[in-house]
Image (cartoon, rainbow, N blue to C red):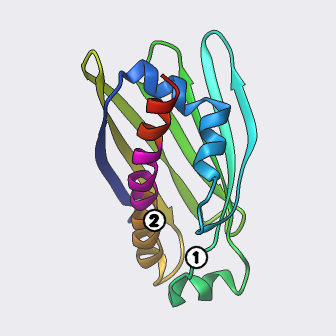
Amino acid sequence: MPTSLEFSHDFPFSAARYVDIFFDTSFIEHLGENQENLDEYKIELLERTENRSLRTIKVAPRIDLPRSIKIILRGRRISWLETTSHVKDSHTLQWSILTNVLTEKIEIGGTYVLEDLGPDRCRRTVLGRIAVRSYALGSKVEEHIARQIETSFAVGRPRMIAYAAIER
């Protein structure tokens, strides 16, 4: 049975500002700088049109994986493409992660819901679903991925806030 994600973080700027920052090249590069737990964090695609924004980031973490995941990977290093899209004037962003290993067995994705809480505040709620089709180990791997995703968002939040303060 897939694992569901739901968590929220508040930001000291509007939802529209959140989207502008999220799809900003300098911010994306800023996120990848000085992170000891990353071997790679690279923009693969960044498109902004009048009605839509799309970004794909290649992420290669430097992490010690639990034994159960190492067994499944059989020594291969894990990386993924994280794709997020936004349609203008919507309050949602769609996201998905495509891993470089076991792509046919791992599905990760969901929605960010942005809610304005006033003129200079918003809340991002991350809703997601993680499904790993692997006999006996699927739920353990899903739980590990869920914790990593939630940690990643928690770490990124203050970096986004600091970036926004500099870029005003």
Residue 146 location (% of width, % of height):
41, 63
The residue to which callout 1 is attached is 63
Residue 56 location (% of width, % of height):
68, 41
Which residue is located at x 46 percent, y 43 percent?
110
Whether residue 21 is in magenta: the answer is: no
Residue lying furthest top: 50
Near-viewer residue (25 or 64)? 25
Which residue is located at x 63 percent, y 73 percent?
62
Tell me the chief SS of the magenta region. Answer: helix
Dot 1: within a 10 Å radius of its alpha carbon, few (fewer than 14), some, or many (20 or more) residues?
Answer: few
| Quadrant showing the N terminus | bottom left
> What type is the residue that disc 2 sits on?
Gln
Left-right relation of 114 to 80: left
User: SS at mark 2?
Assistant: helix
Task: Using the image, determine if residue 133 lies above or below residue 65.
Answer: above
Near-viewer residue (72 or 156)? 156
- Mark sitting on residue 148: 2
Residue 45: quadrant of the picture: top right
Report the span colored magenta. 150-159
> What type is the residue that disc 1 sits on?
Ile
Reading the chain from its start, which is encountered first: label 1 or label 2?
A: 1
